[in-house]
Image (cartoon, grey):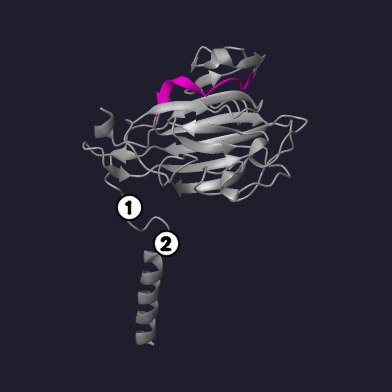
Amino acid sequence: MKKYHAFCLALLAIVCSFRPGAAEEYLTGIDWAEPEVVTPGETDNDPPSDATVLFGEAADVSKWKGADRWKTDGDVLITGSGMIRSKAEFGDCQLHIEWSAPNPPKGSSQGRGNSGVFLMGVYEMQVLDSYENKTYFDGQAGSIYKQTPPAVNAMRPPGEWNVYDIFWTAPRFDDDGNLESPAYITATHNGVLVLNHFELRGDTPFNRAPQYKDIGGKGPIALQDHGNPVRFRNIWVRDYTPPQKASEAE
């Protein structure tokens, strides 16, 4: 009986040692800087308080180079002659942009509703009317041009608005211009994940294999003219800085 009593006491001690709050709290030992407060937009499409609005409600193209050759219609920017580039430059960032393919549709494959969104002026995420319009898969809407198709085709019909939300990690180079880490992109098309931390192999030209070249840590957002009257609206960008240690933020 005494042995049984001792066994019960030992078992009770073990059980009590696992009660909530008994274990010592794990501490990382990292002194984090306080995250900046950002006020979200009224909807997921509206710019948050720290965003740079490149084209908004007014027909104001003052934040673009070359936009005098494009047209505006209220809060809509319509492709014209030549590529346009933002005056501001961005590295790691979050980009929101809405676009609409011409309606009624004209042409086929790459000749239908073709434009493009270029990160840092160099790396293209394709804009194309891919609604019931076959083309090569790494050239359809949501693709990184000539590098990867989107995971799915989330295209809305011509005339309706498509939404790209793009999360961009710029490439890094050493002091001699050698690539240290490639560019990465995560993107949604109309709320659907189409690119998930895709590693770019370099730039996105039509006529050669991709390659990296050190152009500096930042570059403009550029929109392509491909001869089709694609419309754009509600374009805004946020610089992205990852969480920092307190010593880094000082």
Crowd rating for badge 1 (residues with CA inside 10 Å; few <14, some 14–19, many 20+)? few
Left/right placement of residue 208 relative to residue 157 reads left
- What residue does disc 1 label? 26
Q: Nearer the viewer, mark 2 or mark 1?
A: 1
Taking the spot 63% from the left edge, 37% from the top edge, the residue there is 128
Question: Can the viewer see residue 37 in this picture?
Answer: no
* Residue 9 coordinates in the image, percent (x, y): 37, 75
Quarter of the figure with residue 77: top right
Q: Position of residue 139 (x, y in %)?
A: 58, 44
Q: Earlier in the sequence, mark 2 or mark 1?
A: 2
Q: Which residues are magenta?
A: 77-90
Query: Where is the N terminus found, in terms of image quarters?
Result: bottom left
Which percent across, then down, holds residue 90? 41, 27
**Relative to 111, 25 lies left or right:** left
Residue pictured at 36% horizontal, 39% vertical:
171
Q: Distance of mark 2 from mark 1, alpha carbons?
A: 16 Å
Up-down relation of residue 233 to residue 73 (above or below): below
| Disc 2 target residue | 19
Crowd tier of the residue under label 2, counting other residues whose Cα lies within 10 Å: few below 14, some 14–19, many 20 or above: few
What secondary structure prevails in the magenta region? strand
Q: Secondary structure at mark 2?
A: loop
Q: Amino acid at mark 2?
A: Arg
Instruction: Point out residue 194 in the picture as x, y percentages from the top left corner.
Output: 57, 46
The residue furthest front is: 207
Residue 71 visible in rendering: yes
Residue 185: say if magenta: no
